[in-house]
Amino acid sequence: MKRPLCDIMLCDELARNYLPRMRAELVCRLVQRQGVRQSEVSRRLGISRAAISQYLSRKRGSGDIELSDDMAEMLDRWAFTIMNDGSGSITICDICRCAKKERR
């Protein structure tokens, strides 16, 4: 079965809108729900401690995203991957496919 080609417009929307909001949601899940220290999340994501603080206060990645069950599961998989040193990794294409399903 042939894989469908990427849609550059969807990729652009994903990079500008979905990923920052998903990263904010990811940071909130790790820090507030799982109790991971902000410094640890910062280290694992490779971003500054200040960025973590901004995600938590919604100064970065602001805006509401509707989390379908599939997207919530994707965030859970992403969090698991981060906390388990890449075990069970996901890709941007996985997130994009999930976003495509939501647009239909």
Image (cartoon, grey):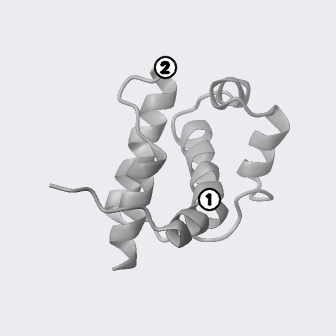
Q: Residues within 10 Å of mark 2 (few under 14, many from 20)?
A: few
Mark 1, other Cα within 10 Å: few <14 / some 14–19 / many ≥20: some
Q: Is residue 97 left or right of residue 36?
A: left
Choose top left, top right, bottom left or bottom right for residue 81: top left
Residue in the picture at 75% in, 40% down: 52
Q: CA separation, marks 1 and 2?
A: 23 Å
Residue 70 vs 83, above or below: the answer is: below
Q: Looking at this view, is 94 or 48 the one in front? A: 94
Q: Which residue ends up furthest to the bottom in the rendered image?
A: 104
x then y, percent, for residue 58: 74, 58
Residue 4's mark?
A: none
Residue 72 quadrant: bottom left
Residue 15's mark?
Answer: 1
Q: Earlier in the sequence, mark 1 or mark 2?
A: 1
Residue drawn at (59%, 69%), measured in percent from left and top? Answer: 13
User: Front-most of 7 and 25?
Assistant: 7
The residue tagged 2 is 85
- Report the quarter where the C terminus lies: bottom left
Residue at screen point 48% across, 37% down: 79
Q: The residue under label 1 is which amino acid type?
A: Ala
Q: Quadrant of the N terminus?
A: bottom left
Q: Position of residue 50 (x, y in %)?
A: 85, 39
Q: Furthest residue to the left?
A: 1
In the image, residue 96 sits, relative to residue 83, either above or below, namely below
Residue 49 percent coordinates (x, y)? 80, 33
At a point 60% along the width and 71% down the height, the residue shown is 64
Side (left or right) of 7 relative to 47 = left
Q: In this view, does 27 lie above or below 81?
A: below
Secondary element type, mark 1: helix
